[in-house]
Image (cartoon, helix red, strand yellow):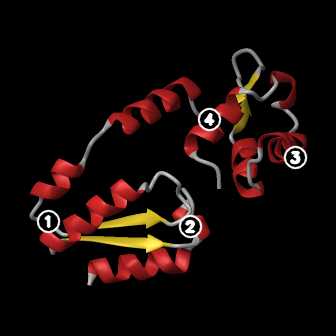
Amino acid sequence: HPSVAQVVHAIESIPQSMLGQRKELQQWLVANKGISGDIAAWVASSVQKDPADGTMGFLFDLDVAKKLLKDFNQQNLWKILDETEYQVDVVMAGNNKSWTPEIMEEMNRLEEVKPNVRAHILPDAGHWVHADNLPGLLQIMNGAFV
């Protein structure tokens, strides 16, 4: 799956005239933006008609999503994991290219010094871990709640 930033960029580039054509929009996202069929279907299902003026738009505010993504990318939560005494299970999507060798090294270090912090890698999952590897996610969650 593409990164969240790639999906946001693809959504920004959708021609306004295509918003009312769900099937065509899905096909266009797959063919022209490299978006998977599942994500393209989600994007297309997020289009609605504005009752006030009849224009087509998204159920979500793309500008807010972009601000949230920017803010998320600026966060550094290692200190929280370093200091927590609570059990924390970090689910890592194996197909997420954001997991750099440096991040993996830091996660391994944390697991060694903090027995209450555990990393779980779902090898066949991208951003949508629940859609890409639901059995694996449920197995992790089951272990975390027992």
- Is disc 1 in contact with disc 2, using a CB cutoff of under 8 Å? no
Image coordinates for residue 3, horizontal then vertical, percent: 58, 47
Would you place residue 97 above or below residue 107 in this image? Answer: above
Foreground label between 2 and 3: 2
| Residue 17, numbered label | none
Q: Which residue is mark 4?
A: 8
The mark that comes first in sequence, 2 or 3, is 3
Q: Nearer the viewer, residue 46 or 86?
A: 86
Q: Secondary structure at mark 2?
A: loop
- Residue at image point 53% right, 73% down: 123
Q: Secondary structure at mark 3?
A: helix
| Residue 27, numbered label | 3
What type is the residue that disc 1 sits on? Tyr
Gap between marks 2 and 3 measured at Cα: 23 Å
| Residue 125, numbered label | 2
The crowding category of the residue bearing disc 2, from other C-alpha atoms within 10 Å (few below 14, some 14 to 19, many at least 20), is: many
- Residue at image point 64% right, 50% down: 2
